[in-house]
Image (spheres, rainbow, N blue to C red):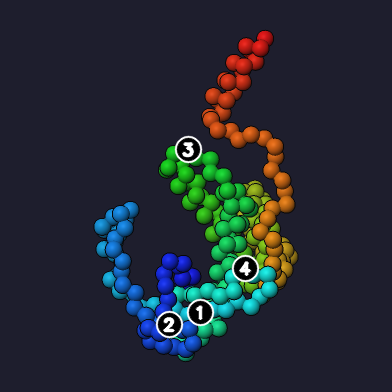
Amino acid sequence: MTRQHQQRRTDFRRGERLGEADHVVLWERPQRPEWMDEDTYATIPETLTIRELKVHVDVKGFRVRELIVVTTLTDAERYPREEIARLFRLRWHVELDLRNIKTSLRLDDLRGKRPETIRREIWMHWLAYNLTRKVMAQAALHHEKLPRELSFSSALAAVNGAWALASVADPSTLSLHAKTQHLGITWSLVGHRPNRVEPRAIKRRPKPHKLLTLPREEARAKLIGGNTTRC
């Protein structure tokens, strides 16, 4: 399920009509782009049955008023339009999850200098994220909460603290530590704020420093050379 690409035109007079601005059409595989290799192109099916439907957004403050959603859930009785719209809106959690990975796990700045190092760095962060989410799911299950009600940053702090404690704890008490950790995670809840609207702007001003546009060693040598000349 995704949003219709802006360059694709939708004609609801075509295809199998399911309702107003809701139909099923057959997409044909486009020509292979230059950047795609032939083996990858061969894995794409020649045709794809797609459902296209128009969704109206009546929430004040939202920029989008209507959009076309495309999905392979073509059964209109099993998947009504309202459920498709609700499910598509839940995709906003993906944006929140990416924010947690970049901010809470500090993946907004990659420090590797070689491709294999960067890939290893990304995979390690993904592993840490999935492990934290698993602990959150376990805590939510044991204490009758929803995983999305729990704070990721608080859970991450609890997991980090538990690892440090588990490394020196007696093996017989690890189960008790896990239960205590789960209880602590469920104490930090995030607010349920449907239709939340925030300005697309940042409050914190950037620091008035120039950007470092060359390697630090070269910049340091340039400063030392300049100071030596003045003396």
The circle drawn on residue 54 is 1
Query: Toward the viewer: 230 or 13?
Result: 13
Instruction: Answer with mark 4 or mark 3, whichever residue precedes in sequence.
Output: 4
**Count of marks overlaid on the render:** 4
Q: CA gap, disc 4 to disc 3?
A: 39 Å
First of labels 1, 2 by sequence position: 2
Q: Evaluate if marks 1 and 2 touch, with contact meaning CB atoms under 8 Å apart.
A: yes
Residue 209 place in picture, x, y as percent: 67, 35
Q: What residue sits 68% from the left and 55% below the top? A: 201
Secondary element type, mark 1: strand
- Which residue lies at the image location 46% right of the left edge and 71% below the top edge? 4
Q: Position of residue 191 (x, y in %)?
A: 72, 68
The local crowd at label 1, few if under 14, some if 14 to 19, many if 20 or more residues have their Cα within 10 Å, is many
1 vs 2, front mark: 2
Q: Are marks 2 and 3 in contact (CB under 8 Å)?
A: no
Q: Which residue is drawn at 26% across and 63% down?
A: 42
Quarter where residue 97 is shown: bottom right
**Residue 195 seen from this side:** yes
Q: In the image shown, does 159 or 1 lie closer to the viewer?
A: 1
Residue 129 picture location, percent across and down:
56, 57
The reply, left or right, for residue 25 in relation to residue 55 is left
Name the residue at 65% across, 15% down.
Answer: 227
Going by the numbered disc 1, the residue's amino acid type is Lys
Q: Is mark 2 on a helix, strand or loop?
A: loop
Residue hosting label 2 = 12
- Do labels 1 and 4 touch, CB within 8 Å? no
Q: Label 2 is placed on what type of residue? A: Phe
Give SS at disc 3: loop
Q: Looking at the image, do the residues carrying marks 4 and 2 touch, with CB atoms under 8 Å apart?
A: no
